[in-house]
Amino acid sequence: MDQFNLRKKILEKLKIRGFSIRPNAMKQLIDFIFNQNIENISDSTDLIIEEIVQTIITFAKEGIKQQSKNAIIDLDIVTKIITKFQNQDTKNIETENLVKELSVISALNHPKYSYSNNLNGDLIMNSQKINDLLGDSNIKTNMFIERFEIVRRRLERNSLFSNNLNSFQLTPVNALLGLRNQTIVCGMIYKLEDGGFYLEDKTGTIKLNLENTNITTGVFTETCIVLVEGYCEGDAFIAETLGFPPCEKREETIKALGYTLNRGGLEMFDSQITIQDYNQIIQIEKDDLDKQIIFVSEINFDQQESFDNLDLLFQGFNVENCPSMFVLIGNFTKSIFRKVAKTILDQGHLSPFPLHIKPIICNLDHSLRLFPTPHSMVLCDNFDTFEGSYEGCHYFNPGLFSIESSFVVYYPLTDEVEFSRIKK
């Protein structure tokens, strides 16, 4: 990567977080990157930018007048960060704790991305820590707006709906009344006390007539975001076809938004990791293709059989072939697996269901969003073992551990799954 493209990439990453950088600071930062013995400059840029963001947050805590948004990064900040890099000794990651190779991100620390209200509609990461789980009175409304906006922007990038002569045109709700022609609308579906279904977007609300509607594949519930094709008749929209917005492959999201693909998503890596650590982790992964993660679900700890099965499971792995992680997951509601997986990925959300049926903490809704589409998704409930692929996302269910003694061995690097069962 040459200096021009590196400069462009750094500017894009900073802009996403609401930061700008002075020219002299940018020059010193680029010189520093090119003076390092870095195997992959593109991947390492993510880590440098994360260090910058963390440093600005630290300055703010110390009382220096830096804002979390629209902050200007000057030469002093870049100099401090370069000094921090240079003072760090290269660590031997192979003897370090596994947190260096594998990070578990809690809902409280999950990065929150949302689109700004400026003319460009830039994607901004909110780095402020959530201290109040319930949030303020606007949190529920904002939650649905942010969900809808992420899907709408994804839809606008799709070739079927982009602004060209051969694409479909989306009509906002407030432009439907009086429109005689057939059209397509994207909105959130919900039900009012009168028993009728309505479609809502950021511009307005209209009643839906679903009497003769052709419904495509998926699990449709209230608050789902849908595409509706039809026409207006009186004060109602006659829906001829109802379906989900198409999912977007992870690589397409990354390319469209100008990110460098890294291990955890857009920015979910350990913020304390160094460039040297990162390159060593990549090498460790290449040297050990048999790294495993064990997924076990439906573990009923009120039954002795579950503990007996766990004992047999742990005995089956010795020190030499011990997996990187055991993921023990409880029981969830029963679902039709393939349709649920498609619904979740199309909606870009792990819980796209009405709040009165599936309550969530609205202030942590962003931690349930699948943005961008993940490499793999594990859905666990009292359903038989199952796997499939949809738009590049590999999804699977480990099955019933307490009843069938089944579990999954997952190889992250190759994205392969082995369904296993304890023999008694």
Image (cartoon, rainbow, N blue to C red):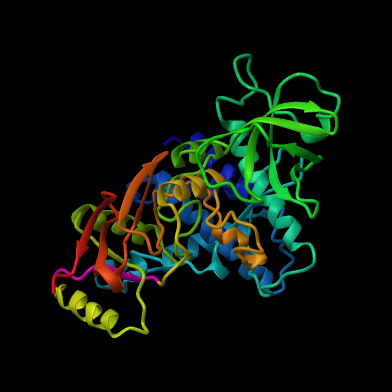
Query: 209 left or right of 166?
Result: right
Identify the residue at horizontal 36%, vertical 82% (top origin).
301
Residue range highlighted in magenta: 320-329
**In the image shown, does 34 or 270 lie closer to the viewer?**
270
Residue 326 in sight from this viewpoint: yes
The rendered magenta stretch, by its main secondary structure, is classed as loop
Image quadrant where one finds the C terminus: bottom left
Identify the residue at horizontal 41%, vertical 47% (top origin).
338
Query: 88 left or right of 111?
Result: left
In this view, the residue farthest toward the front is: 211
Q: Is residue 78 above or below residue 228?
A: below
Q: Position of residue 250 (x, y in %)?
A: 46, 42
Identify the residue at horizontal 19%, vertical 55% (top origin).
287
Q: Is residue 239 above or below residue 383?
A: above
Identify the residue at horizontal 80%, vertical 29% (top origin).
176
**In the image shown, does 385 or 42 lie closer to the viewer?**
385
Q: Position of residue 46 (x, y in %)?
A: 47, 52
